[in-house]
């Protein structure tokens, strides 16, 4: 494999194993999703704890 | 048969393929987290199959399977796989012991509840998630259409209840929040944490997306289960199907092999791989 194609191969590998730069999805949407899901998880756990403690009736 | 009653058949098929896929990985790599995930997914699949069966006919042992594996245990075991992946082996052994004992105890309580099941309440025209539990009717509260109302004494008080298959105050019902809290915390928390680690290091976008999908799938079933507790059981089957699809898609996405040219990120992969 010559030098140029080796460099191309490395670039392809890097693109696959690293996040794309300036990506709206990875820069904005992913953090919002992670925080949002964290909040929902805490809310669901509090609800389940409420059931356990008898605060929420079922 | 309504559209809602067909959904568990689809969930069962997806979970069967998912379970075989994960257990195959366990037999090749012998990593315990694959075994715990496989056990939890098999329980999820058994619960879905039981729902599908109960949409057609009554069988008290199928109901046993539905409640114990589908409602109580599966989330805890799937989440335990994530704990085994992310924490030290010493803690995993300890928590595995607690989980096994807890599961056996829940099974014992479920067996104890079996003679007291109110089988007359069952109707195949309603989803099992809408008729499994007896619920106290608060003063002024309107009972759901078609509900069977009766008066009973509970903890020394005369109360009006909507009849369900499991009698009021059945102890096994108190075990489900323990398993579900543990499962939600470890499965969703672990997936969010893994996604965050890869996102922060700007590596392996497939694992970021895969873990986001797994967390979203687990939240979908957690949300649907919570609504079921609140009396909106008709969304449970849809939540399960969404969970099965998202978690399987997330697992496949995260497990997709990616080339890595630097030794640093490769270590991260081994530390938090799916």
Image (cartoon, coloured by chain):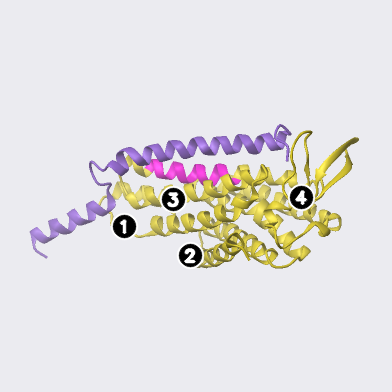
Chain colours: A purple, B yellow
Give the position of the N terminus of chain B as an image quadrant: bottom right
Question: What residue do we see at 20% from left, 56% from top?
Answer: A12
**Crowding at label 3, few (<14), some or many (≥20) Cα neighbours within 10 Å?**
many
Left or right side of A44 for B190: left
* Sequence order check, earlier mark of 2 and 3: 2
**Crowding at label 1, few (<14), some or many (≥20) Cα neighbours within 10 Å?**
some
* Sequence order check, earlier mark of 2 and 4: 2
Q: Which residue is mark 1?
A: B258
Left or right side of B178 for B18: left
Q: Report if residue B7 lies within the magenta region.
A: no
Chain assignment, label 3: B
* Horizontal and vertical percent position of residue B127: 67, 57
- CA gap between label 2 and label 1 equals 17 Å
Question: What residue do we see at 43% from left, 58% from top?
Answer: B249
- CA gap between label 1 and label 3 equals 18 Å
Give the position of the C terminus of chain B as an image quadrant: bottom left
Which element carries disc 1, helix, strand or loop?
loop
Question: What residue do we see at 48% from left, 64% from top?
Answer: B25
- Confirm whether circles 4 and 3 share one chain: yes
Q: In front: B45, or A19?
A: B45
* Horizontal and vertical percent position of residue A45: 60, 37
- CA gap between label 4 and label 1 equals 54 Å
Q: In front: B198, or B156?
A: B156
- CA gap between label 2 and label 3 equals 20 Å
Q: Which residue is mark 2?
A: B25
Q: Which residue is mark 3?
A: B213
- Confirm whether circles 4 and 1 share one chain: yes
């Amino acid at each position: 494999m010559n030098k140029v194609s080796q460099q191309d191969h490395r670039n392809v590998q890097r693109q696959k194993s690293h996040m794309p730069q300036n990506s709206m999805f990875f820069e904005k949407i992913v953090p919002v999703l992670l925080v949002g899901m964290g909040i929902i998880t805490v809310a669901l756990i509090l609800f389940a704890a409420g059931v356990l403690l008898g605060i929420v009736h079922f | 048969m309504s559209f809602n009653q067909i959904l568990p058949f689809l969930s069962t098929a997806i979970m069967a393929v998912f379970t075989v896929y994960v257990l195959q990985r366990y037999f090749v790599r012998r990593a315990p987290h694959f075994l715990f995930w496989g056990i939890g997914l098999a329980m999820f699949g058994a619960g879905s199959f039981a729902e599908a069966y109960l949409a057609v006919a009554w069988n008290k042992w199928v109901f046993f399977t539905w409640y114990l594996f589908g409602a109580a245990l599966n989330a805890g075991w799937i989440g335990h796989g994530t704990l085994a992946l992310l924490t030290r082996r010493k803690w995993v052994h300890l928590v595995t012991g607690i989980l096994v004992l807890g599961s056996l105890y829940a099974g014992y309580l479920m067996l104890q509840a079996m003679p007291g099941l109110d089988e007359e309440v069952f109707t195949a025209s309603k989803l099992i998630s809408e008729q499994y539990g007896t619920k106290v009717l608060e003063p002024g509260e309107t009972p759901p259409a078609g509900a069977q109302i009766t008066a009973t004494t509970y903890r020394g008080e005369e109360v009006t209840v909507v009849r369900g298959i499991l009698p009021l105050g059945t102890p096994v019902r108190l075990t489900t929040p323990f398993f579900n809290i543990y499962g939600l915390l470890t499965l969703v928390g672990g997936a969010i944490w893994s996604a965050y680690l890869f996102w922060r290091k700007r590596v392996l976008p497939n694992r970021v997306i895969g873990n986001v999908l797994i967390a979203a799938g687990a939240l979908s079933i957690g949300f649907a289960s919570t609504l079921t507790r609140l009396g909106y059981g008709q969304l449970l089957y849809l939540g399960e199907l969404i969970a099965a699809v998202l978690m399987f898609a997330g697992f496949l996405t995260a497990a997709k092999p990616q080339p890595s040219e630097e030794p640093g990120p490769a270590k991260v992969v081994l530390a938090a791989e799916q």
